[in-house]
Amino acid sequence: MTPQSDPIAATDRARLRLDLREALKFDGIRPLDLAPQSPQLDRLRRRGLRPKSASTIFTLAEVNGELLWEEGFGLRSAGLRRGRNQRGGVRSEIIERVQVDPLPLGNEITKYLASLDQEWTPKHGLRLWDGTVLHDPIAPGRPIVSKGPILVLVHGTFSSSESLVKEIAAAPNFAAFLQKARKHYNAIYAFSHPTVSVSPVFNAIELARHFRGVKADVDVVAHSRGGLVARWWLEVMEPAAAGRRRAVLVGCPLDGTSLATPRSLRAALSWLTNVHRALAAATGLASPLIPFLSVVSGLLRIAATASGVLAKTPIVDAGISLIPGLSAMTRVNLELDRLNIELATRPDYFAVVSDFSPPPTGLAVWKFLTEAKARAADAAADLVFRGDNDLVVDRDSMQFLCGRPKAAQINDILDYGSQDLVHHTNYFRQPRTLTFIEQSFKL
């Protein structure tokens, strides 16, 4: 049963529609009313038929304040016909219909994912950051600073080094943090890398190549999926490094994330759309670290491919399996099982975690995000998270190393607890986060 929430205001629906249209800029994705018309295809669709080469229609609708993506023209999950409806206490409003061209299997999917990475992370490689300027990537094979302590920043999924350093610079105590970092480190680098077209293992290989032969002590600050990149690099690619290795892992899916393990890719896209709507409307919570609607727009084409070409694939969600960067973060994951094996020694790890729990009153869409926990007992519910989370990563996964929870393998943890301020994309704006980094690295 869809939870009862207050409807989204008409002005907010109009703004969301405008924001979504601005994000629909990838090839093969367009608002339905701007798509080329085909009377023959329209007749087939009215008869319930779908040509093999036909596009897929996705509908974004509001159902009692909750935003849902559905395949087709209407709202099957709410039992409603297309258009504006109010039946049995369930209210719905169509926000947008999008026409999406599925991709052929094979290299075209890889090329498309690479184009998404190019959009979200335009410059790839190790980049020097002086606190104000983020320089262009260093060419592979070119020498980097090899003496004295080095700090490396690693961004997360759908993000970029530019966004990460902007978030760090937005913290009230950034100036003091930067002064200490400049005094302590001979160089500060940011590692820009693709996050959807390849696994974190391949990112780690590239990072390890830059540090081949570097004997200096290295500290790492990693956000989200960047923590997996850092762990593969430090534990597997450089297990016998000459210098000391430490890492602060901020909101990292050390044991995967439920966002990459939904019952359907559409469920994850609905979740991200609701998160965008909620954070955009809430004063002081918005952050550009992840462009949520751009991510939804880009991944709609993968959803269309899974729905069309792989409609009969006997797995929970073919869509996620088509995205190497996300499938490497599922909760049931042989890749992570291998990363989490027991080691005699490992780098010093520190973690920052949060459970974002907005109040049950106020903005209607918060009710969808908070009531998800209350509905978790319903195994049939099309939910993403069934427990504590920071809107992107499960809380238990952020403090899980080598098959053991919490401090069994992590030196120290900054736990923001359950609150309505700190979520996945604004950790670095919190003064306590930068202070925790200073203390962990003894700056």
Image (spheres, rainbow, N blue to C red):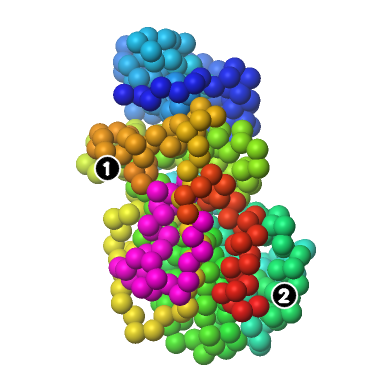
Residue that appears at 56% across and 74% down: 440
From this view, report whether residue 2 is shown above or below residue 430: above
| Nearer to us in this view, 76 or 304 | 76
Q: Nearer the viewer, residue 96 or 124?
A: 96
Question: Quick check: 172 left or right of 395?
Answer: right
Q: Residues within 10 Å of mark 2 (few under 14, many from 20)?
A: some
Name the residue at 47% across, 11% down. 84
* Residue 90 shows in the view: yes
Q: Is residue 26 visible?
A: no
Whether the magenta-drawn stretch holds residue 4 is answered as no
> Tag 1: residue type?
Val
Count of numbered circles on the image: 2
Residue 113 in percent (x, y) is at: 49, 49
Which mark lies nearer to you, 1 or 2?
Answer: 2
Judging by the rendered image, the residue that carries numbered circle 1 is 316
Q: Earlier in the sequence, mark 1 or mark 2?
A: 2
Magenta-colored stretch includes residue 390: yes
Residue in view at x 47 percent, y 33 percent: 360
- Compare residues 170 and 236 and report the one nearer the observer: 170
Residue tagged by mark 2? 180
Task: Please state the extent of the stretch shown in magenta in the rendering.
Answer: 388-416
Please state the horizontal and vertical placement of residue 22, each as a whole percent of the image: 63, 32
Residue in the foreground of this view, choosing between 140 and 218: 218
Helix, strand or loop under label 2: helix
Q: CA distance from mark 1 to mark 2?
A: 48 Å
Q: Is residue 354 above or below residue 264?
A: below
The label on residue 404 is none
